Amino acid sequence: MTATSTHMYPRLLLTGAAGGLGRALRPRLTKRCDVLRVSDLGNLGDAGPGEEVMPAPLQDRPAVFKLLEGVDAVIHLGGISTEQPFDDIVQANIIGAYNLYEGARLHGTRRIVFASSNHVTGFYRQDEVIDATMPVRPDGYYGISKAFGENLARFYFDRYGIETVCLRIGSSFPAPKDRRMLATWMSYDDLERLVVASLSSPVVGYSVIYGMSDNPHVWWDNTPAKHIGYRPQDSSEPFRAAAEAKQPTLDLKDPAVIYQGGGFVKAGPF
């Protein structure tokens, strides 16, 4: 931390800054640091006050290493966020994750907030409640890549002491889009609360937490991550009537209804 900084992390890196969650977090994070470095392959626009714009393909190791120079902490949202062919997933989400962590090690970055996914455990059933201590059950190549990222984060903490909070993000949108999202939904305000808690908690080590709001109907128990200090304040309940009207009945034989991963469990083959 510089002598003049009033922030815990003077320079933050936000990858995936042009994506949906990146666009939601970008203006919020500029208030949490002296400099916010934003990166993506999508349109990032011009740098705003207190921002640095540095596009970089995650699979380009020298570019990612440069991206990590002078960075105190990372919010890593970058990569492919939907089910896609394995060869594409490998480049962005697996090689890209390695490049990010190795760059953090080389440049002394202290903490990473890693956007994992609920699809790491998508093949658990919707009539089960699970927590982050249970074995992973990925529902596709995307989920596999996020499970790899979680294991990579564990290794870099155990070997090099880089702290990571892995966020198994549910469905973060302005409102739930269907009945499944009544369980998985997380508001943008709660997303901000979760990221800030992950950055500001004094000691996180290697932690995994599900990203969801305070929904009445849940599949995930966040008790093992209470030490993070995340306290969601929003709920999907106000959207229940609209979601149920949109889907008045469910096909209980549909794998997307049986399993927590929803449509991801039957995406592909490609």
Image (spheres, grey):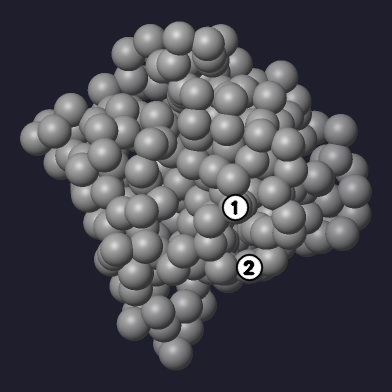
Q: Is residue 155 visible?
A: yes
- Residue 33: numbered disc: none
Identify the residue at the far front of this view: 3
Which structural element holds mark 1? Answer: strand
Marked residue nearer the N-terminal end (2 or 1): 2
User: How far across and down, in percent of the image, does residue 40 sit?
Assistant: 55, 61
- Circle 1 Cα neighbour tier, 10 Å, few/some/many (<14 / 14–19 / ≥20): some
Quarter of the image for residue 44 reads bottom right
Instruction: Examine the rendered structure and indicate whether residue 194 appears above or below residue 37.
Output: above
Quarter of the image for residue 123 reads bottom left
Q: Tell me the residue at 22%/49% (across/down).
A: 102
Q: From the viewer's perspective, is 192 left or right of 243? A: left
Distance of label 2 from label 1 (alpha carbons): 12 Å
User: How far across and down, in percent of the image, does residue 126 sit?
Assistant: 52, 48
Quarter of the image for residue 97 reads bottom left
Q: From the viewer's perspective, is 60 left or right of 260? A: left
User: Could you tell me if the residues under marks 2 and 1 are in contact, i.e. CB atoms within 8 Å?
Assistant: no
User: How far across and down, in percent of the image, does residue 193 sit?
Assistant: 62, 24
Q: Type of residue at label 1?
A: Val
The C terminus appears in which quarter of the rendering? bottom left
Q: Nearer the viewer, residue 63 or 22?
A: 63
| Residue under numbered circle 2 | 42
Q: Tell me the residue at 71%/19% (across/down).
A: 233
- Report how many numbered discs are placed on residues in the image: 2
| Residue under numbered circle 1 | 53
Instruction: Examine the rendered structure and indicate whether residue 78 appears above or below residue 214.
Output: below
Tag in front: 2 or 1? 1
Q: Tell me the residue at 29%/64% (across/down).
A: 61
